[in-house]
Amino acid sequence: MRTLYLLRHAKSASREEALEDHERPLSPRGRRAARAMALHFRELAADPALVLCSSAVRTRETLDLLLPGFATTPIIATERGLYLAGAESMLARLRRVEDRIERVLLLGHNPGLQMLALELAKEAPSDLREPLAHKFPTAALATYRIESGWSELAPGTAHLVAYDTPAGLGVD
């Protein structure tokens, strides 16, 4: 069985005229949330073998703060194509993951990430799906179990098993 983690980047600094969107770093609040999520990964013994990460500064900084939460160092693929990608693009990228890889973390942006999360969770219990449909805040994590190979991943084929937010972990 495979595991997919969809994580939205942590909160970024406010939009400053001097920085393009791709270059915005994390805010102090975002750093706190990313560290809390790293602890959460450690507590769950959630250890992705592969991380697919958008090339934006805020996603790369989120990943840097998450890495101490993993027991082993994953393969990291930082990809420009994941920056502000839509659900279909992210799904297409996940379908290209080699089947020998059992646990993947995709670190990206809304609205595409939330759309992908909802598409994959079409059959999820309402107590998990409704909060996800309502909001996918920064540093939120949706965890799925997948019984098929990555190439067969499609809407409704993944089982949403957890949805965690920084607020749910006690981070403001």
Image (cartoon, rainbow, N blue to C red):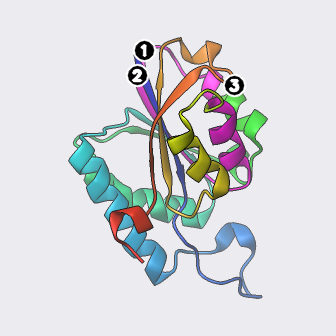
Neighbour tally class for label 1: few under 14, some 14-19, many 20 plus, Cα within 10 Å: few
- Name the one closer to the observer, 4 or 99: 4
- Quarter assignment of residue 154: top right
Which residue appears at 56% of the width and 18% of the height? 150
The residue wearing badge 2 is 102
In the rendered image, which residue does mark 1 sit on?
A: 100
Q: Amino acid at mark 3?
A: Pro
> In front: mark 3 or mark 1?
3
Circle 3 residue: 155
Q: Circle 1 — which element? A: loop
Front-lying residue, 28 or 22: 28
Q: Residue at x 71, y 87 (%)?
A: 16
As drawn, 152 above or below 8: above
Q: Residue placed at 72% from the left, 44% from the top? A: 115
Q: Residue at x 62, y 40 (%)?
A: 117
Magenta span covers which residues?
Answer: 94-120
Q: Give the residue type at disc 2.
A: Glu
Classify residue 102 as left or right of residue 80. Answer: left
Q: Would residue 161 appear left or right of 83 to someone viewing this image?
A: left
Q: Secondary structure at mark 2?
A: loop
Is residue 17 shown above or below 102? below
Q: Quadrant of residue 50?
A: top left
**Circle 1: residue type:** Arg
Q: CA distance from mark 2 to mark 3?
A: 19 Å
